[in-house]
């Protein structure tokens, strides 16, 4: 009898090992994060794929592909398959998701995982279908889609299922998603293509215009992370290395936080203005809740020094940065997987039902 019970247990253990763990994915323009139930965020990789144009084979994905940007020979191309939060290159996205899902699973599985994918608010049915197809082609058994402001709110612990109004601003890599939430749904949303990548572009353009120095995306991003501030002191600095526009020779100079502020202030103000516009169309009952509980900032842009204070001064509403702004969407997607029925209304729909 004991041998028979042990055999059943062994079969069940084997079945569990071959069954894919449920996965939440924040499919971002700059980075893709993968959340596995019971483990948390296990992958945070740049949304970049390098492939050989001669053989059409993938050479590298994620961090190993990012270091190739601007350094590849002619037959190798490093690309970002996600533009402004939506798929621009289906085949490359599929390869990237396959790599990330396999890595998250940590081994071979027979039964694919259930996957919840965070996408920008307001994407079209065609774009949602592309997300579903790419995830399923990558090995997912079931695919659910949730809008990023909702996922970020869930991941930040906001009371999204209650009748209380909550507001979140998710400043990602390609887009900023702003949402007002109540009773498990988005009451109103606004999506703008001003976010981390735009800040990088602003910094590159400013340094070229003011200092006649050409720098790359990676350098601009490093400068942003090290010195971006809405209220600069002039004390924080970064080194910018690139090519002198006039001589064509290598050159480096010191960039202060005041320079970076001057470069990105207009874009930051546009995000604050977009938030103000959404507040102006929000029902009065929810406005009173938001006035009391505050606006929450998530995403990498929430980490810009002093941005929360700038929001407060302009909007006259308390503003808080969420506990884990970089992983809020991925955590929210994972929380949904823990109880699909509970958060059913928070999902756009099961994408099997999307009409093309």
Image (cartoon, grey):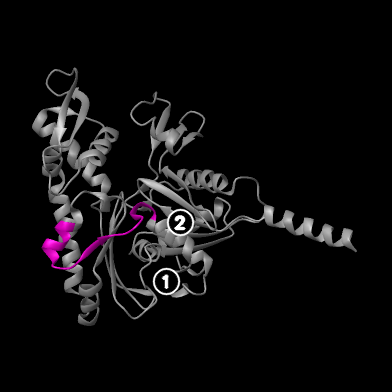
Q: Give above or below for 141 relative to 70.
A: below
The residue segment tinted magenta is 309-327
Q: Residues within 10 Å of mark 2 (few under 14, many from 20)?
A: many
Q: Residues within 10 Å of mark 1 (few under 14, many from 20)?
A: many
Q: Earlier in the sequence, mark 1 or mark 2?
A: 2
The local secondary structure at tag 2 comes to helix
Mark 1 and mark 2 in contact? Answer it, CB < 8 Å: no
Inspect this view and state whether residue 79 appears.
yes
Identify the residue shown where x is 37% and y is 73%. Answer: 160
Outermost residue, right side = 1
> In the image, what residue occupies the spot 56% across and 58% down?
22
Considering the image in quadrants, where does the C terminus appear? Answer: bottom left
Q: Quadrant of the N terminus?
A: bottom right
On whether residue 164 falls in the magenta region, the answer is no
**Residue 81 position in % (x across, y down):** 40, 44
Q: Position of residue 136 (x, y in %)?
A: 55, 55
Q: Is residue 236 left or right of residue 146?
A: left
Image quarter of residue 10 = bottom right
Q: Which mark is residue 298?
A: none
Task: In this rendered view, identify the residue nearer to me: 242 or 257.
Answer: 257
Q: Secondary structure at mark 1?
A: helix
Q: Nearer the viewer, mark 1 or mark 2?
A: 1
Q: At 20% across and 43% down in the image, what residue appears?
A: 228
Is 235 left or right of 74, judged from the image as shown?
Answer: left
Q: Is residue 351 visible?
A: no
- For residue 346, which numbered disc appears in the image? 1
- Real-space Cα distance between discs 1 and 2? 18 Å
Q: Is residue 323 magenta?
A: yes
Q: Which mark is residue 131?
A: 2
- Locate residue 234, reporting x and y percent: 11, 38
User: How many numbered discs, if any?
Assistant: 2
């Amino acid at each position: 009898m004991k041998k028979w019970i042990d055999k059943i247990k062994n079969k069940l253990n084997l079945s569990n090992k071959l069954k894919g763990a449920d996965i939440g994915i924040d499919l971002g323009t700059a980075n893709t994060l993968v959340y596995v139930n019971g483990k948390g965020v296990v992958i945070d990789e740049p949304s970049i794929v390098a492939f050989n144009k001669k053989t059409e084979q993938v050479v590298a994905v994620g961090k190993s592909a990012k270091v190739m940007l601007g350094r590849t020979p002619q037959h190798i191309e490093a690309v970002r398959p996600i533009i402004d939060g939506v798929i621009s290159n289906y085949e490359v996205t599929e390869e990237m998701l396959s790599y990330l899902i396999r890595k998250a699973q940590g081994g071979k599985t027979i039964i694919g995982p259930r996957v919840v994918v965070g996408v920008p608010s307001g994407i079209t049915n065609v774009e949602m279908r592309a997300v579903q197809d790419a995830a399923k082609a990558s090995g997912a058994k079931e695919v659910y889609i949730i809008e990023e402001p909702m996922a970020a709110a869930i991941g930040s612990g906001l009371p999204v299922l209650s009748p209380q109004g909550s507001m979140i601003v998710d400043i990602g890599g390609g887009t900023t998603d702003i949402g007002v939430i109540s009773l498990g749904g988005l009451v109103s949303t606004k999506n703008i293509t001003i976010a981390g990548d735009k800040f990088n572009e602003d910094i590159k353009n400013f340094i070229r215009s003011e200092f006649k120095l050409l720098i790359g995306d990676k350098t601009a991003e490093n400068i942003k992370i090290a010195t971006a501030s809405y209220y600069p002191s002039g004390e924080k600095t970064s080194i910018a290395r690139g090519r002198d526009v006039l001589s064509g020779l290598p050159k480096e100079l010191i960039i202060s936080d005041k320079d970076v502020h001057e470069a990105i202030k207009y874009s930051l103000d546009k995000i604050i203005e977009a938030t103000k516009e959404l507040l102006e169309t929000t029902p009065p009952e929810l406005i009173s809740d938001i006035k009391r509980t505050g606006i929450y900032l998530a995403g990498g842009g929430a980490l810009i020094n002093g941005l929360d204070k700038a929001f407060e001064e302009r909007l006259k509403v308390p503003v808080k940065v969420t506990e884990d702004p970089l992983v809020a969407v991925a955590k929210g997607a994972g929380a949904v997987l823990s109880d699909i029925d509970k958060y059913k209304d928070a999902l756009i729909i099961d994408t099997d039902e999307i009409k093309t």
